[in-house]
Image (tube, grey):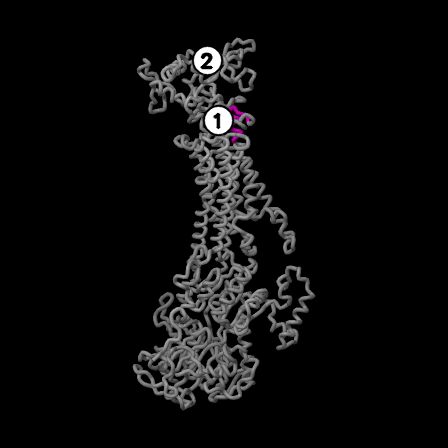
Amino acid sequence: PGFFVFVGDATIMVNTAPPAGGGPPPPTPINLEIHRFIKIVSGIALMLGLIFGIVCIIQDPADYVRTLVFVIGIIVANVPEGLLATVTVSLTLTAVKLGKVNVNVKDLEGVETLGSTTCICSDKTGTLTQNKMTSNHIYLEFSSSTDPDSTYEVNALTSSELGDPTPGFDFTDPALAKLLMTCNLVNACVFDTGKVGTGVDNLSLYIQARECLNGNASDIAFFKFAEGCLWKKDGLTLGTQPELPAAEAMRTANPTATVANSQGATQKLIIPFNSRYKFMVSVNWVMDPVEGKLRPAVLMKGAAEQIFQRCGTYVKGSEVVPIDQAKVDHFVKVYDTFGGAGERVIGFAMKYLDEDSSYACAQTDADTPDEMTVGGVPLDASGEPIKPDATGYYAIGSQQFLDWGGPDNETNCMDKCPPPATPAFDALTFVGLISLIDPPREAVPPSVLQCRRAGVKVVMVTGDHPKTAAAIARMVNIIQPTAETIDMYAERTGFGKDLKAAQAAAEAECAKLDLNLAVNRHMRYTKSVVEARVIPGHELKTMTPDQVKEAFMYRDLVFARTSPEQKLKIVNAAQDMGHVVAVTGDGVNDSPALRGADIGCAMGIAGTDVSKEAADMILMTDDFSAIVLGIEEGRLIFDNLKKSIAYTLSSNIPEISPFLMYIITQMPLSLSTVLILCVDLGTDMVPAISLAYEKAESDIMERPPRDQHVDHLVTVKLVSFAYLQIGVFQALGGFYSFFVVMNDYGFKMRTVIGSAGVLGGASGVAFAKDGDKISSECPCGGGLSWDDYAKDAGFKLSSVGMVECSASKGTTEKCNGAGSNDLYVEIQTGTDGVRYLETDTKAYTMLEDVVTKKSNYDDMSSFLSAKCDVTSDDFGVTWTKNDDWYPLASKAMTPDGASKKTKWSPNNWPYGFGCPYGALRPSQYCKYPEVTFVGPNPCYKGIEALRHAQTAAFVSIVIVQWADLIICKTRILSIYHQGMENKIMLIGLTSETLLCCALAYIPGLHQGLFTRDIMFNHWTPSMPFSILIFLYDETRKYLIRTHKAAYKGTPNEEGWLERYTYY
């Protein structure tokens, strides 16, 4: 019967697997940045809206509707409405790009986190290497050795040539038979018996080319090595081999022992590989190559030094010899040779159980558990390594390991302490070593160099031996070619094993260097010329968090023989230093580190379901270079968001400044609230989103990672660039366009400033009627249009917008409506400059009828006298023929007054009953009095001129935003280098222009948006400002690049312009 050691939350699975309901994860860097930006923008918008709203209330407490619209306009002008869409598009595009390189992104925001990464803690096998292992060397003591070091190159055994090992050896030697037992029987790998690739029979291929099922890359390498050796032993060749592969036939002849488990079911005696103990065990019935009989044996494979320390004897041909110091030294020498070449070294050991009389073992049929007892107790079938004094324990060398290496190998005694004089009762017999070559992925070395240039520290965290880890790290540029570890430095300088003395010498040598130079800057903290450090797991176990942080100060860093639990210790230390850490992992025990890292990257091929669940992204091909691509894409997201925000914020100044000018100078709004919405929710949306499609600048992986405490999404420099530089240019362009249009229609700049009251105030609505009050600014009306009065008199509007005279007036004559001035009361001016009311017009008759009907006045004169505060010969404003805008009837008019009076034409008449066009006095000639528009000609009509000028200001924002969009493509490079390959941006430029035209020229929109069909030449005033914006920014970027190139690598590399304008 079994028993429970831990239950519930105390079990290993619960403590390593991600919690099902552990609360929300911490916010990602991009999430924090967006929330920070929202707070800043919201604060600014609400503050400005409140300030301007208070000013409006003070100026006109009764007009709360106008104030509300005003405040909404201010707030809307400050909010980049396209940001959310840009963020979503950026993240989605990146996920699609990464998906094409077999990276499954589970958390979109995590991609940007990868762009902020400053440290990558990467596995070696399968991530940095190809995970296509081949048996390269063996270390085995044959009966008759052909090599003085007992090492043999064996990779030709499985090649297409089926070559011989170098040097050759005896394939019938008992030592080789035992090596084949331990590497092949402790293995579940088999050949695929079907068709592979293009439909080729897998078993028709040579050994190395065959596809395998089950097992990892190491198992496959051992299995193919065993198959090759058995072919050589039996004289088999491709085409003559039996149907059942030789290695699989060997397993049939040497079956795994079985035992009854706690439920009484038959179970194989296997201890699966455990990353903490780093070995795998199988108990088999094996054919003893010396005695020629089937015997029960423990077979073990695993980390070479861990296996060796569990052994008290070793195989030498047909003999078993005690391990002495000479054997230990020889083992260490061979291991260092293999490991130094970057080969993964696996050790093998075994022990015949029937050597000990306490074991009772008997083989039965396949369906019945074997008799496998020790001291009368069945062998433990739990599948976990057990303590030497536990019930059911069978020999796996645990006591020998403790006697030699201490608990958990804490002293690493194998190369420091002699082997125990008397082997422990459970000591195994060391068989030999097989070294595997697993070449680095082709893309990894340049990817690591790219990370270095980008300021990202790459740290190897592997379960391999320190020698192997260091060699592979050097191959993939994690350790630079010229860098030395303390061991290498001690060996070069003659200190040997005295590492303390070597460290002191390295520090003394460093003290002579100038640490201010860029090449020596990384030594400032370590104070040592030793630039690389390799930390084994037994050393890491005893290190404090501060000591781990100190290790991160070395430029090149490798952690070897680490357990998955130690990964979390490494990650936490890096995060405490301020690093943004990305971690790769594939096992269940890796899940705490994957979950604890800023971004976890699980392996798609070798990864377990638990690790994939805990990770933020899955590398479907287990390829490290995909992480580097993710870093670039993450940085691109942040860059493009900055560019989009810079583009969007720039238009805030030309949108806010009209309100500011209104408050300060009482100038009419050059851009209405509705047109601000048209910019923010219309013309700016697609261009802002198009920046998400912008490709990376060529220097994106040359910059250091952003400092999350300094380099925010929105910084003072970005606000300065958008508001105080580009925004000022845009505001000037908008005001210039506005004043040019007003000037062209008869209103000089000095006349417009301060005229908000006579042009309808901030709302731009002309004199809404309020009871009996009539504006004193208006010489001839009470705030309603002529159409309103005409309808009151009994006329009705026709379907084409004309006033149809009623039958009661005795005529069916069509009369013009508010669209022109034919029926407006006309004020005539004589040659003497005296103005008078024309009473013999149809308009006067109709108006007099309205006055009589709707008021208590007897005639028109009394009505005007009471309501308009005018006299019959002067209408409140003194106009003379000396005014520079004074219209003449003809150029033939003589100074002596031959022409008695000058009559205003309908296009030139600025007022009309009710002042529907405002009461702003013209101040010069109108340049376009006879141009036909969809609505009224704006000449001398203040409100109409204002509408045209506001539309021109709206158009000017679109035009200057053309240049703004182009300059925002890059932050430091010239547009010449970046190019115009962004097709979505071209669509954005086209769409905003077409939308601008639609808003200006579709008549149905004029009434709701107060836009007008401006002339083409009124598109041009802002174009020089657009060109100026482009030239200014190109010059700024050129000066930054020139300064950086001139002072590269010096403390003065960042010049004044970059310091204050590079956002």
The 10 Å Cα crowd at callout 1, few under 14, some 14 to 19, many 20 or more, is many
Residue 563 lies, with reference to residue 522, above or below; the image says: below
The 10 Å Cα crowd at callout 2, few under 14, some 14 to 19, many 20 or more, is some
Give 1062 or 872, whichever is nearer the viewer: 872
Q: Where residue 125 appears, x then y in whole percent?
A: 48, 69
Query: Horizontally, is 972 left or right of 436 in the view?
Result: right
Which residue is labeled 2 in the image? 837
Q: Amino acid at mark 1?
A: Leu
Give 394 or 470, whichever is nearer the viewer: 394
Residue 182 lies, with reference to residue 1022, above or below; the image says: below
Q: Distance of mark 2 from mark 1, alpha carbons?
A: 24 Å
Which residue is labeled 1 in the image? 759
**Mark positioned earlier in the residue sequence (2 or 1):** 1
| Residue situated furthest left in the rendering | 367
Q: Which residues are magenta?
A: 738-748
Q: Where residue 676 appears, x then y in whole percent?
A: 47, 37
Identity of the residue drawn at 50% across and 71% down: 562
> Is-magenta flag for residue 913?
no
